[in-house]
Amino acid sequence: MLGVYLVRRFALMLLTLFGISVLIFVMLRLVPGNIADILFDAAGMIDTAEKAKLEKELGLDQPIAVQYAEWIGGLARGDLGYSYVSEKPAIDEILPRIPITAKLAGLALAFAIVFGVPLGVISAVRQNTPLDYLLRVVSLSGLSLPSFWLGLLILMAFVHYFGTIPIYTDPPKGFWEALWLYSVPAAAVGFRSSALVMRLTRSSMLEVLRQDYIRTARAKGASPRTVNYHHALRNAVLPVVTVIGLEAAFLMGGLIVTETVFNIPGVARFLVEAIRWRDYPIVQNLVMFIAFVAVFINFLIDLLYAVLDPRIKYAS
Amino acid sequence: MALRQTAIVAAALAVASIANASAAEPKQGGVLKIYHRETPPSLSIHEEATFSVNAPAMPIFSNLVLYDQHKPQNSMGTIEPELATSWAWDKANTALTLKLRNDVKWHDGKPFTSNDVKCTFDLLQGKAQDKFRKNPRKDWFANVTEVTTNGDYEVTIHLKRPQPSILAMLASGYTPMYACHVTAAQMRTHPIGTGPFKFVEMKQNESIKLVKNPDYFKKGLPYLDGIEYTIIRNRATAVLAFVAGRVDMTFPTEMTSALIADIKKQDPTAVCEIAPINVNTNLIVNRETEPFKNPELRKAMNLALDRKSFIDIILQGQGDQGGSLLPPPEGVWGMPPDMLKTIPGYGDVNKSREEARAIMTKLGYSATNPLKIKVSTRNLATYRDPAVVLIDQLKSIYIDAELDPVESSAWFAKVARNDYSVGLNLTGNGIDDPDQDFYENFACGSERNYTHYCNKDLEKLFDQQSAETDASKRKSLVWEIDKKLQEDVARPVLFHARTGTCWKPFVKNMTIMNNSAYNGYRYEDVWLDK
């Protein structure tokens, strides 16, 4: 049964990615201007003949369907093409940035889980106590403070109190330097994510704690710790896992503000720059990569549901 | 007691003078760290038109001649030999012969010869087999008929007509020499020059690294071991990085006066300079569409302008009023203030606006029946902000304007095809010389003459001033031309901006050019007193 389900999900994944590829390709070309427009505009040039020459050189004069087929064909062969701006292979431009964002996203996610889940449980168990109110205010501020503002505030505080600034100017040398470099921006991002996780854990826990089987567990003399963490949390965690999965997918491509403020040369900042230059090979492949990560994480979460809740069966 | 005090003072003075002497003695070594505002499109200076390229790429290259890097005001009198050792004009002033150094090597070890100069001009003029992807300054050398070599170390640049300012073009940071054996494509990704620093790498969104050229033809230079540009897109982060000492210098001319005040508050030791950058903000009116065909209406619009308000609101006072050319004292060719005041629109604002309203009333407009227009501008803050002030000022003469922000990539193409009625534009000048400005922006048929102003008689004066070898006669002609351009409302200049640069006090020998933002980045004798 699981085998059939996996095949179906895999086919669906491919279909989704195909749809995304068409969408990216078309939407990118709906945005006004191409690389030739941008390059010529940046140089203050308006010679249309020269611009047409450059468009031909880059293959932008081809029909969109031909351009799409060339891209997908290249993608299937592992050839991502060349960046229009740097004139280097797109793969060489994209690959080094993925680990940077992955580290930042991983740390931020770890921060969100480590703080969000336990604090959510505590908040639910101590419902309507001063501690619950405090945690709810903290989580609300995490959701409402703009990342840009928070990031800059952190940087200003570092400069003012420590005379240093935790931004990326050179690749970190060694584990500890990397941890130092990524932990501050990860905390800034993770604060928001942890707030989301915490609020969801709290509401989900509150719902589960009212269930009959929890009352039964208590009546049977199970310790509060066993009731809360073994019986309640396991059942309350399903929606939380979904949100953590969505957050993970978001963090791989959505950290533009954090990467800009902390000057981290990751995927999101690179993507925005590539869009600015209409660097199609970079944008198309990078968005496809982010889409793949999102689709794959969703797939993993679906599988995780069955592990977390044995009642869920994957039928054909 | 008095003797003891005198001895202490003398000792202190001696120590101070020794300290000064040692501070004045350049030290070798160290890496200068500068933040860069963006990833440059490439490092091929000839193919780009932004000092985002000149700043990191100028140290890689050399010119035939170059503006003295320690005289802030670029002028014909500050041009010095670089790859050339000397130059001479023929009697007709149509052939410029330059003798070249014979001890120069490209960064890949090949010798520099006169052929490289010829190759550079062939590329610029589109005569070479290899082509630039973009060639934004080919018009600078439209008067060059050919470049001939006389042996390996002498070249002659032949002109159609006399043009002394060709030397100014050659001295700009925009005119480095390229190697025959390096393709245009390679120059974009891995430039090879003869300059004090070699290119190491450029990583998009990360950094640009240059390292000392040990074979630099000026012995003992450069002092620095290298220059590293860290690309920091967010200016607030960049300022904090400078204050925290992660970079030694801000990106040239990137600081506003408000930011400089903030930096000085946080780091009082920072050295900051504010100077003009020879970029002017101007009003463009499409004189080929109704109702702007009417010169009276264009005149009224010019009379409505309160230039001081623009400078106060947009630049916190850090700007200058002037004509098309950068005004003195920093500008070499701009009209003097007394002359400027005589031009309509540069005097008493209230009187001018009264006159403007009278014209508008005569044309049938009033407070209840205003002229409705759109002010188009590029969708960037440096364009949008003054456009908003312009809209407010036009209200005073019964013009009800609406902002039309245009996608940045479409802006120049839009104005070039005349698809606008009123707009606000920025015009930057690579060199402070009338030839570049007049021919590019006001000559009949020039593609960057966005307002399509065309005055054949004035164009004769363009040629006359261009060929004039007597500097003072040329200046008089230039003033006459600039005055006429302003009176004709060819492209009214709203203001010339001033911007700032900051560096740490241990960065020595840093000079910021004050009449161009494109020419002062060779950095061969900049050193770090650490």
Image (cartoon, rainbow, N blue to C red):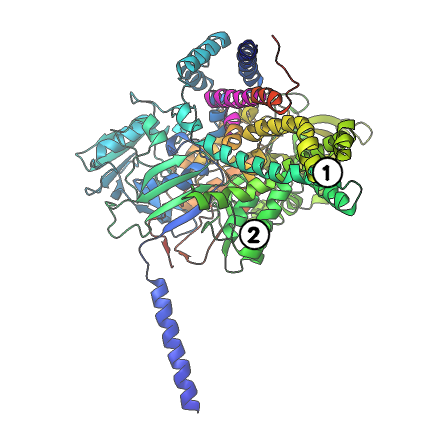
Secondary structure at badge 2 equals: helix
Amino acid under label 1? Glu
Percent across and percent down for residue A208 are 74, 29
The residue beneath circle 1 is B355
Query: Looking at the rendered structure, which numbered label has been put on residue A229?
Result: none
Give the extent of the magenta segment: A273-298
Which quadrant holds residue B123? Answer: top left
Q: Main secondary structure of the magenta part?
A: helix
- Does the magenta portion include A47? no
SS category of the residue bearing label 1: helix
Instruction: Using a 10 Å C-alpha cutoff, classify the residue at mark 2 as few (fewer than 14 neighbours), some (14 to 19) or many (20 or more).
Output: some
Position of A216 compared to B482: left or right? right
Q: CA distance from mark 1 to mark 2?
A: 57 Å
In the picture, the quarter occupied by the C terminus of chain A is top right
Disc ID at residue A158: 2
Q: Is residue B21 left or right of residue B321?
A: left
* Residue drawn 51% across the image and 44% down it: A167
Residue located farthest toward the right when viewing the structure as drawn:
B368
Q: Which residue shows up at 61% across the image and 26% down it?
A: A246
Is B392 situated above or below B506? Answer: above
Pinpoint residue B221: horizontal percent, then vertical percent. 28, 51
Residue found at x 71% / y 43%: A138
* Residue A152 pos. (x, y %): 60, 45
The x, y position of residue A172, in whole percent, is: 43, 43
